[in-house]
Image (cartoon, rainbow, N blue to C red):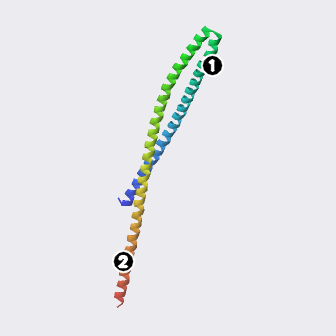
């Protein structure tokens, strides 16, 4: 098997690996985008919930206390307690989603680095093929020049 054939086989192997890594990176990128949307939605829901709790505790509770409605105050306190429990669950969900996002981000960066490495290897091999072709061309030209010199030398000797 010639050197060029081996190098071209290596290029094809790395190009195949490159295509697979691109597919993997694109798949992870979609997962990353999805997890980011979930992360942002969870964060927004948590912020809205905190705003609602704060509004109830600062405005509604004060109004109910001023109106002297003990039953409504109990209901309001129960509702705030329920919302606070929900906020605790949202924090847990938020942390899980953030962890999932971070894992996907790490995987994306790893695959992207591998893709860069494969592309570097392809360039190295392409450079080797190019150098080999130039060297072969120089050798062929040198051989041709030597043959021409020998032919002209042989031709001048045989004419004498």
Give the structural element (helix, strand or loop) at label 2: helix
Residue 59's disc is 1
Task: Name the residue carrying label 2.
Answer: 146
Residue at image x 49%, y 30%?
97
In front: label 2 or label 1: 1
**The N terminus is located in which quarter?**
bottom left
Q: Is residue 51 left or right of residue 117?
A: right
Query: Which mark is first along the chain, 1 or 2?
Result: 1
For the residues labelled 2 and 1, the Cα–Cα distance comes to 101 Å
Q: Residue furthest front?
A: 66
- Report the front residue among 81 and 90: 81
Residue at image x 58%, y 22%?
54
Position in image of residue 8 (x %, y %): 41, 56
Residue at image x 37%, y 81%?
149
Question: How crowded is the residue under tag 2: few (<14 C-alpha within 10 Å), some, or many (20+)?
Answer: few
The answer to whether any part of residue 20 appears in the image is no
Question: How crowded is the residue under tag 1: few (<14 C-alpha within 10 Å), some, or many (20+)?
Answer: few
**The C terminus is located in which quarter?**
bottom left
Q: Is residue 58 left or right of residue 23?
A: right
Looking at the picture, does residue 151 appear above or below residue 68?
below
The answer to whether any part of residue 55 appears in the image is yes
Q: Quadrant of residue 74?
A: top right
Marks 2 and 1 in Cβ contact (< 8 Å): no
Residue at image x 50%, y 22%?
88
């Amino acid at each position: 098997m010639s050197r060029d054939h081996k190098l071209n086989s290596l290029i094809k192997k790395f190009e195949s690996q490159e295509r697979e890594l691109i597919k993997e990176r694109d798949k992870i990128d979609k997962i990353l985008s999805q997890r980011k949307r979930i992360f942002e939605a969870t964060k927004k829901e948590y912020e809205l919930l905190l705003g609602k709790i704060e509004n109830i505790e600062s405005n509604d509770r004060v109004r109910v206390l001023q109106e002297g409605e003990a039953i409504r105050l109990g209901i309001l306190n129960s509702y705030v307690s329920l919302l606070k429990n929900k906020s605790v669950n949202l924090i847990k969900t938020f942390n899980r989603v953030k962890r999932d996002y971070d894992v996907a981000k790490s995987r994306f960066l790893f695959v992207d680095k591998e893709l860069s490495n494969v592309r570097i290897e392809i360039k190295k091999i392409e450079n080797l093929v190019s150098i080999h072709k130039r060297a072969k061309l120089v050798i062929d030209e040198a051989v041709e020049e030597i043959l021409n010199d020998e032919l002209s030398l042989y031709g001048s000797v045989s004419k004498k």
